[in-house]
Image (tube, grey):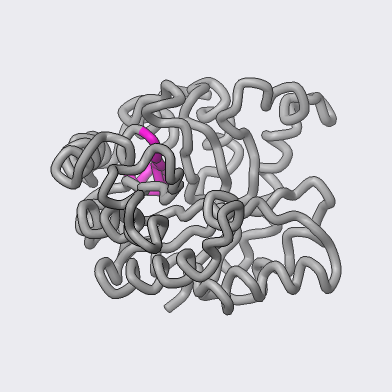
């Protein structure tokens, strides 16, 4: 199944556009998970069990696993998510960005070692960085475009031929990198003016929107300003506001409320860029 078809299936089966991040921090886990011999795996499984039917995607964060030597738990968590929520797209949030055989190895790591459907990619080194992650139609690359961190505009907003760099990145992704329909953009849900500008430059691409919840972004605003003309096209990611909500019942309720705000329905009228 092509990557674009995987996304469409994920939206349809979950009836929404919610993504939940798997960002385990042992010090902030519920006590029963933290006491487990494999706390990272136990925590991830708890999250997947609680929200698997509500999400269109899971986004495991690579550093949160690698920093504590839990790469095996990452691989097992992805396999567990596939078994429990086979419709969900798995996005490895690793922010890779290199060239040549190194980029090829990073793509192999994401798609073969971890069996992710997609991986986040930093395009700073140009086409040579991006293309190794786009060779397989069934796997995708999520290009960092306009990220949600407060200082992002210092670089991403630099003027290039009369427009911000992030708009130029969005346009190149739309017109060049998406030949196999497996390119997405990472655009924070924290600045609606910039989100609207990205959507205007890339009307057909799917967007990953981090920043909902703990970073202050609004799921409703992201949908209003970022959805495609068909009412789809978003993967809105929440991490701390869901996975640190409490026990399984509280986690599920936090995800359910967000999913309702992102439920598929009629096309959304977008604000002009």
**63 is higher (above) or lower (below) than 106:** above
- The residue at 51%/28% (across/down) is 196
Whole-percent x and y of residue 245?
26, 34
Q: Which residues are magenta?
A: 228-240
Left or right: 90 with respect to 123?
left
- The residue at 57%/25% (across/down) is 194
In the rendered view of the protein, which quadrant contains the N terminus?
bottom left
**185 is higher (above) or lower (below) than 198:** below
Instruction: Please say whether residue 153 is one of the residues in the magenta stretch.
Output: no
- The residue at 40%/31% (across/down) is 212
Q: Quadrant of residue 88?
A: bottom left
Q: Nearer the viewer, residue 29 or 94?
A: 29
| Residue 48 seen by the camera | yes
Left or right: 148 with respect to 38?
right
Q: Quadrant of residue 14?
A: bottom left
**223 is higher (above) or lower (below) than 119:** above
Q: Nearer the viewer, residue 182 or 41?
A: 41
């Amino acid at each position: 199944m092509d990557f674009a078809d995987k996304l469409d299936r994920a939206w349809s089966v979950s009836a929404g556009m919610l993504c939940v991040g798997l960002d385990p921090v042992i010090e902030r886990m519920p006590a029963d998970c933290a006491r487990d011999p494999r706390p990272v795996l136990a925590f991830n499984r708890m999250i997947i069990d609680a929200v698997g039917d509500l999400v269109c995607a899971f986004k495991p964060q690579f550093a949160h696993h690698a920093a504590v030597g839990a790469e095996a738990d990452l691989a097992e968590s992805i396999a567990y998510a596939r078994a429990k929520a086979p419709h969900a797209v798995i996005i490895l949030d690793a922010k890779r960005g290199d060239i040549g055989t190194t980029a090829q190895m990073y793509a192999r790591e994401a798609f073969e070692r971890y069996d992710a459907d997609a991986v986040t990619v930093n395009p700073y080194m140009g086409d040579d960085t991006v293309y190794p992650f786009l060779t397989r139609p069934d796997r995708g690359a999520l290009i960092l475009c306009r990220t949600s961190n407060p200082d992002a505009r210092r670089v991403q907003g630099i003027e290039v031929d009369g427009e911000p760099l992030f708009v130029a990145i969005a346009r190149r992704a739309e017109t060049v990198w998406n030949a196999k329909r497996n390119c997405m953009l990472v655009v924070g849900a924290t600045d609606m003016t910039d989100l609207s500008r990205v959507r205007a430059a890339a009307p057909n691409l799917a967007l990953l929107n981090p920043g909902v919840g703990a970073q202050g972004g609004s799921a409703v605003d992201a949908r209003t300003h970022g959805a495609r003309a068909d009412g789809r096209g978003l993967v809105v990611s929440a991490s701390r506001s869901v996975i640190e909500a409490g026990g399984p019942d509280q986690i599920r309720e936090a995800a359910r409320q967000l999913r309702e705000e992102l439920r598929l329905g009629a096309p959304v009228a977008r604000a002009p860029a």
